Amino acid sequence: MTDSEIEITADLVRDLLREQHPDLAGLAIREVAGGWGNQMWRLGDELAVRMQRMDPTPELQLKERQWLPVLAPRLPLPVPNPVRFGAPSERFPKHWTVMTWVPGEPLDHASISRGDHAADTLARFLKALHVEAPAEAPSSADFGAHPKHCTHGFENFFRAVTPDDIAADVRAVWDDAVAAPEWEGPPVWVHGDLHPANVVVSDGTLSGIVDFGAMFAGDPAWDLAAAWVLLPEGTAPRFFDTYAHADEAAIRRARGLAAMKSLFLMLMGQNGDRGLPGGKPRWGPAGRAALDRVLTGV
């Protein structure tokens, strides 16, 4: 059995806690559905254990450990905050982290009914997050590039899942993003991976943001794409009005990135329908709905 195939069970989590954080070992442990790179276990009422699973390196967890305590105090929504560190051991040769639990239901298992409230909430969150990052902030090889440098990924998703009847419209949105001017401001903090499984909702609106493993310093358009990927139809204009810092070029880049992210969600949904590893059946309908919102514009 390889490291990536280690079966992570409640008993394993409890054993690791007994070894490294015995004061937490008596709390109830419950598996949290979802997760691919990392597996989550609820620990009591206020904590969670994030176990490195398919991620090939601990880089994403170590990034969260370093930077979330810096960012969390100034963000207007709850985010997971690391409180204890688990070191690799003979029992489990990977990293794991005890973090604060963010209450709510993941958006891929719920819906937003208070669209205007959610648009304002997301805009204010991103306005608070998108401040100039320090020189030592992480960069990203996978996220953060101008759309013109992401054409290979877009083309793969486009060929795999784009319906023929909207292919020309999707291509036009992408081409417009590729032609948009680059980000000329200083690198700002960016979550980088805002999709329905990485936000939680309560009472019909956004109530928390999770999974900051992709965070980097760079172009905020990667987060602004969430105006279409996460929010209900017709609320993108309100989002951009409340955010108030996105120029035309940023919106063009964001809309193209939203198209690419939507296609990715559709592909993951297709993989789930086919029973392939890592597939997410719920993501397909969410991705198609997001793509339809992209095509309506701002």
Image (spheres, helix red, strand yellow):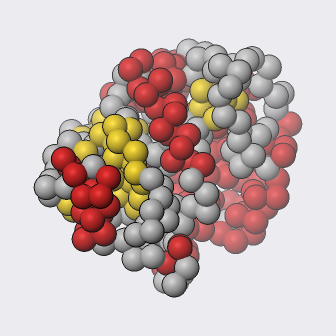
Residue 138, horizontal then vertical, whole percent: 66, 34
Answer whether residue 298 is visible to the viewer in this image: no
Tally the numbered discs: 0
Where is residue 66 shown, x and y percent of the image?
52, 33
Residue 51: image location, x then y, percent:
41, 59
Query: Is 46 placed left or right of 115 in the picture?
Result: left
Can you give x and y, in whole percent of width and height, for residue 259 in the image?
65, 50
Of residue 61 and residue 288, the one placed in the foreground of this image is 61
Q: In the figure, residue 82 lies in which quadrant?
A: top left
Q: Quadrant of the C terminus?
A: top right
* 191 relative to 276, above or below: above
Residue ID at (34%, 37%): 83
Q: Is residue 212 visible?
A: yes
Residue at the image point whose x is 47% and y is 24% from the top: 71
Please tell me which residue is depicted at 67% across the width and 52% down the height of the picture.
Answer: 260
Determine whether 128 is above or below 295 in the image.
above
Q: Nearer the viewer, residue 168 or 12?
A: 12
Residue 160, relative to residue 81: is it above or below? below
Residue occupying the point 51% across, 19% down: 127
From the viewer's perspective, tell me whether residue 76 is left or right of residue 223: left
